[in-house]
Amino acid sequence: MDYGLQISASGALASIHAQDTLTNNLANINTTGFKPLLAGTMFREAARIEDQLPQFSSNTLLERLGSGVLSAPETINFAQGELISSDSEFDLAIEGDGFFLVGDPNNPAFTRDGRFTLNAENQLVMTATGTPVLSEKGDPIQIDPTQGILEVWSDGRILQNGQPVAKLAFADVPSRDILRPIGGGQYASKDGSALQTIEGSGSIRQYMLEGSGANEIDALMKIQSASRSAQSNIGMIDMQNRLISQAINTFGRLS
């Protein structure tokens, strides 16, 4: 493939990937506890450097032109979302740093989606997925709805009629760079291994939910920018195709 076509194609692919990521952010502007992904690009090294073959000869001028770009690894923006009032005693929001632990007690997932409810076995679960919410002991939390209104303190303690029922598992990780979204508003380690946790430093707020971290205006502007970038690169591909075709036809007649 022509070198210029390769550079333009890499820019187009990176821009299209950014569009997909940003469109997903925009689609989740009303999703409770959603944290948007940040998309970017990074410079691509020359082929012999990228392939770790520095001993091979190369065209110095072409290497100075660069090899285009690649999509950079996506990062998650964990900035605090707006707290929104709710009428449900099971709805909880986190103000500050920390996550609820849900799912497998041996390898729990993290979530900021505090829309909880009771399943048929009276276990506290995520409304969206039915995933069990875990206590600090690592067990599913059992709630007897006949024992009165639920009261949840800022440190995660759950009471009914003033009597302790359980305490929510509330934790964080030393570095959030190891987290990846796994769907359903949940996060896990990138390699699937159990996360090393630290105590969450935020506070839990009952009768509240955390709004989406995605910003509609910001997402729209970035989608438009990525779209223009993709169109520019595709235009360059089209122009180079026409130049190559013209050159072939011209030199073909001369021969």
Image (cartoon, rainbow, N blue to C red):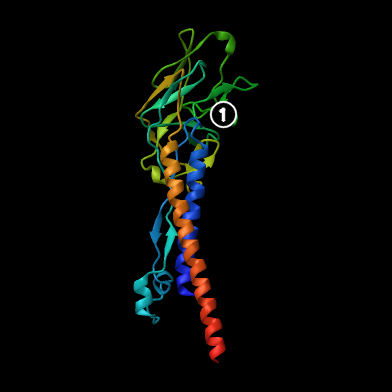
Q: Position of residue 138 (x, y in %)?
A: 50, 30
Q: How many marks?
A: 1
93 is higher (above) or lower (below) than 51:
above
Q: Is residue 234 left or right of residue 69?
A: right
Residue 107 seen in render: no
- Tell me which residue sits at (46%, 47%) in the image: 223
58 is higher (above) or lower (below) than 110:
below
Q: Position of residue 196 (x, y in %)?
A: 42, 40
Is 130 or 24 nearer to us in this picture? 24
- Tell me which residue sits at (58%, 31%) in the image: 131
Residue 117 seen in render: yes
Splitting the image into 4 quarters, where does residue 76 fall?
Answer: top left
Q: Position of residue 154 (x, y in %)?
A: 39, 20
For badge 1, the amino acid type reads Pro
* Residue under numbered circle 1: 132
Is 40 or 33 nearer to us in this picture? 40
Q: Position of residue 85 (x, y in %)?
A: 45, 19
Tell me the SS state at disc 1. Answer: loop
- Tell me which residue sits at (38%, 69%) in the image: 66
Q: Residues within 10 Å of mark 1 (few under 14, many from 20)?
A: many
Is 44 or 106 nearer to us in this picture? 44
Q: Residue furthest right?
A: 120
Name the quadrant of the C terminus.
bottom right
224 is higher (above) or lower (below) than 144:
below
- Tell me which residue sits at (65%, 21%) in the image: 120
Splitting the image into 4 quarters, where does residue 79 fall?
Answer: top left
